[in-house]
Amino acid sequence: MTVNLTRSPHAALAMDGRYRKGRKIERLLELASDASSRRLLEVGAGSGWISHYFAHSSSGQYEVDAVDVVDSRQSKDGYRFTPVEGAALPFADGAFDIVISNHVIEHVGDDDEQARHLSELHRVLRFGGVGYLAAPNRWMLVEPHYRLAFLSWWPKRWRSAWLRLWRKGSDYDCRPLSCAQLERRLENAGFRFEQLHATALQATFEIESPDHPLWRFVLRHVPAGIWSLTRRIFPTLIYHLHKA
């Protein structure tokens, strides 16, 4: 994931977890069914393992670029890496067939920078291309970066104080959005989108824990209508993007 230069890095560094994430993204965007060579951009390279996964994928052909404001990469081969400052992307309009923003938008800065992040994703994605965006929901019970309940529920000006009260840090450097806020910003950026919360949950269990009892006996049997009712409170917001 990416961070602003004044913010703390929160990159997930383990190869296995990032490879599973790459497989899930590939599945959710239905990329493996296309054997043609496609140009892919990961915004927020983090550990580099997701870019590495696509660069070396056996199920598709990807020419991979990655960017980040901090170089935290554990793997550097098979793809191009470009350091950036802020949300601006150093690529031409419509340069990519696929864009990926995986838990990035909450780290890029204020409202204007978040809007710019989305507009830049839209700008560099070609018409007919697809995008993947994942972000934590502001109304998640436990904030995932600091493992602290209710942290993002508070008004912005109170969050750092809550963090300090529980001795989890000094300054809260993330800006998670609610489902309604994120979808409004996606619309403003010019995207058409489909929320994939239930499909993504299914993919996560089938890739990582297909025999887990919670999946086998409970979650896989939940009716689609129930998933639809939970879409605004789902802890992770995941979207399939199209350039409108």
Image: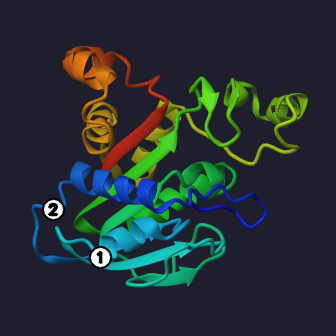
Compared to residue 105, the image places residue 100 above or below, namely below
Compared to residue 37, the image places residue 2 above or below, namely above
Is there any visible trace of residue 190 in the rendered image?
yes
Please identify the quarter of the rendering in which residue 40 is found.
Answer: bottom left
Q: Amino acid at mark 2?
A: Ala
118 lies left or right of 217:
right
Viewport quadrant of the C terminus: bottom left
Q: How crowded is the residue under tag 2: few (<14 C-alpha within 10 Å), some, or many (20+)?
A: some
* Residue 85, position as x, y percentages in the image: 66, 75
Q: Amino acid at mark 1?
A: His
Sooner in the amino-acid sequence: mark 2 or mark 1: 2
237 lies left or right of 40:
right
Report the residue marked by disc 2.
32
Label disc, if present, on residue 199 of the rendered structure: none
* Residue 168, position as x, y percentages in the image: 82, 38
Q: Nearer the viewer, residue 104 or 146?
A: 146
